[in-house]
């Protein structure tokens, strides 16, 4: 599913490819390089709040940990 995200800072559209209709996490506009927290439900952006570069890095680190633990749970099954 392709979702269009409109940047509230520069009003530019970005496209995201999602396996499901939902997403929660960090996003960076490709044009103005500002950071945002996105919440996408059923293919529509419901939240797009600006965040700092440090918060962006924190979101990425948390996502990496989630994926790591998900892999170990899958391997244990």
Image (tube, helix red, strand yellow):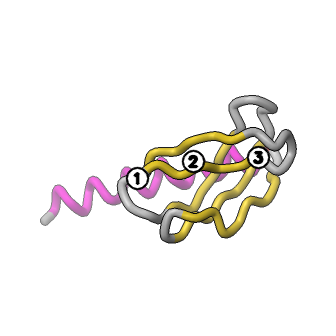
- Contact between marks 1 and 2 (CB within 8 A): the answer is no
Mark 1 or mark 2, earlier in chain: 1
Label 2 crowding class (10 Å Cα cut-off): few <14, some 14-19, many 20+? Answer: few
Horizontal and vertical percent position of residue 32: 81, 32
Q: Tag 2's secondary structure?
A: helix
Q: Tag 1's secondary structure?
A: loop
Locate residue 9 relative to residue 66 in the image: left or right: right
Mark 3 or mark 2, earlier in chain: 3
Residue at 46% from the left image edge and 53% from the top image edge: 65
Q: Which residue is mark 1?
A: 1
Residue 28 forms part of the magenta stretch: no
- Give the distance between the C-alpha atoms of the residues marked 3 and 1, in whole angstroms: 19 Å
The residues colored magenta run: 54-76
Label 3 crowding class (10 Å Cα cut-off): few <14, some 14-19, many 20+? Answer: many
User: Which image quadrant: the C terminus?
Assistant: bottom left
Q: Which residue is mark 2?
A: 61
Q: Which residue is mark 3?
A: 7
Q: Which mark is residue 73?
A: none
């Amino acid at each position: 599913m392709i979702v269009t995200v409109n940047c509230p800072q520069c009003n530019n559209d970005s496209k995201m490819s999602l396996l499901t209709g939902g997403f929660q996490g960090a996003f960076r506009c490709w044009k103005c390089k500002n950071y945002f927290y996105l919440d996408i439900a059923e293919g529509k952006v419901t939240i797009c709040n600006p965040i700092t570069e440090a918060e962006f890095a924190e979101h990425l680190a948390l996502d990496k940990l989630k994926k790591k633990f998900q892999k170990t749970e899958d391997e244990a099954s």
